[in-house]
Image: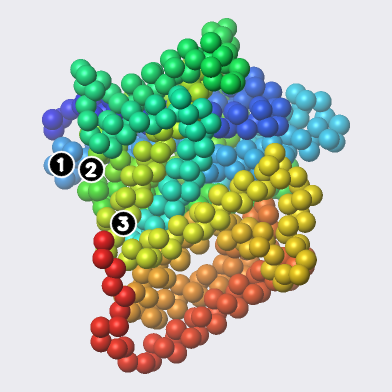
Amino acid sequence: MKNQWLVRGDVNGFFGLMFDNLTVLSFLAGILVFAFQYPAQIVYAKMFPGTALAVLFGNLCYTWMAVQLRKKTGNPEVTAMPLGLDTPSTIGIALTVLGPCFVSLKSRGMDERQAAILTWHVGMAIMVMIGVCKLILSFFGDWVRRIVPQAGLLGSLAGIGMALIGFLPLVDIFGVPVVGLVALGLIFYNLVAQRKFPFDAPGVLVAVVLGTFLYYLLGHFKLLGVEVAAPRLASLQTALPLPTLGFLDGFGEALKYLPIAIPFGLLTVAGGVNVTESARVAGDDYKTRDILLVEAAATLLAGVFGGVAQSTPYIGQPAYKAMGSRIGFTLITGLFIGLGGILGYVSFIVELIPRAVLAPILIFVALDIVSQAFIACPAKHAPAVAFSFMPSVARLLQIKVSNPAWVLPATFAALLKEPGRALPEMQVIVALGNGFILTAMLWGAFLAVLIDGKLRQAVAYLAVLAGLTFFGIVHSAMPDGNMYLPWLVPSPARLVPFEFTAAYLLLAALIFALSFTRPIAGGGHQCAL
């Protein structure tokens, strides 16, 4: 097995990683086309090819890194780091940058195609700026991994897994339950319960094929309650991704959205650090800097070649290892997605496979992430891991409540200024959700070192939280997550940076004072798992 490039487990890994990427592309296209009436042809022929090229580049790099690690360690069971499109930022940028930009440009008098092309250029410019930011920050990843406890690193990922990667797809599954639950159950049967299908067929492929078949069969007989129509083969369009300076045309407009977009880049850097730690715990010790440099280069490449979604190492690397995947799955996934963006079959598959069938793959990855966080961390740090979930829950609530399809913008604005409360409940939810990955990491780290009795380190984490809060890097009071100078924030949102910061500093002062007291023997918290 030592020199094998492809093993049986790579087949399952390929279908899992490939469908993960298709799921994100499906969300991107769905938001732009259906929520903002953006032209589908530009999404498929302009945005997808460059985005897919970045996935090809990143997975080729990670495959090569896995080969080198296998040679270095002599371990034939090294699993490559999977790279794909970042789910939270792809959805977030579609909802808060690309869609609103398209609507704004049309409202200024541009015709639909002009507005769509400039919006595409804005998306490219955002990717270039995020890529440069990530490139610089890549050199600090190892330092972060060394100083932040595992509870902070893995707990923040587990929160994302539970609230965003897990729960949101669950809604899609039960939106078409006859189809979605069947696909989910088959994924559980094969990948969670470790039961084999007849002829050792790949579980992900079986679930997707059977789920898709059920969807169109039941839809044909009008048994799903929704209109079902398969995409036409005529919709296949070839589009070669070529380098372009179109992103320069979008820079001016993109600067308006920079405070929204850059935090997404920061979050994937933090996530990349966490992912590397997750892989290390699972047995594959990659260099954090190298993992981050590849994701930064892939994001930058996407922007130059027309892509509008940033790439990131996927947080389910141990899940792919559990599937038996090794090195080949990233190679064939990169080739499949990259060529699919060029030849057009990725767009066709995105339209063909229902989200209720793709969603169970994300559920499996989410469960593996959450499980690993509790298993890998010391048992006494379980409260810190659980505490790290909270910001992701707030982010989930914010995403849903701020969606104009759910709550009218005027109603949402009124909730942010609820009379009779100094800090309205909706304002607190928004603040807790903004910067949620960094918040979760720091909360988990703070509580972990507090449990360990390292009070001065706990004070340091609180001080960092206070500094980041004051300028809106975390706990931004603005609904769109903008950073700011706190004295320029309008009331009542202005209370957030001042009161949250004061709270962190006051707690830091109290714990610092307690650090001079003598600990009571046996007074520590015990948590049995």
Relative to 511, does residue 392 appear above or below in the rendering? above
In this view, the residue in front, 503 or 274, is: 503
In this view, the residue in front, 389 or 23, is: 389
Q: Does residue 446 appear left or right of residue 243 in this picture? A: left
The label nearer to you, 2 versus 3, is: 3
**View extreme (top): residue:** 234
Spatial distance from mark 1 to mark 3, Cα to Cα? 26 Å
**View extreme (bottom): residue:** 517
In the rendered image, residue 453, in percent from the top left (x then y), is placed at 33, 79
- Earlier sequence position, callout 2 versus callout 3: 2
Q: Secondary structure at mark 1?
A: loop
**Residue displayed at 13% across by 30% down:** 1
Residue 84: which quarter of the image? top left
Residue 333: which quarter of the image? top left
Q: Does residue 108 appear left or right of residue 166 in this picture? A: right
Q: Which dot marks residue 404?
A: none
Give the residue at mark 2. 69
Asked whether the viewer can see residue 136, the reply is: no
Q: Are marks 1 and 2 in contact (CB under 8 Å)?
A: yes
Q: Secondary structure at mark 3?
A: helix
Q: Are marks 1 and 3 in contact (CB under 8 Å)?
A: no
Amino acid type, residue under disc 2 in the picture:
Leu
Amino acid type, residue under disc 3 in the picture:
Phe
Give the residue at mark 3. 374
Q: Secondary structure at mark 2?
A: helix
Q: Which dot marks residue 75?
A: 1
**Residue displayed at 71% across by 45% down:** 407
- Earlier sequence position, callout 1 versus callout 3: 1
Q: Does residue 38 appear left or right of residue 179 in this picture? A: right
- Earlier sequence position, callout 1 versus callout 2: 2
Neighbour tally class for label 3: few under 14, some 14-19, many 20 plus, Cα within 10 Å: many
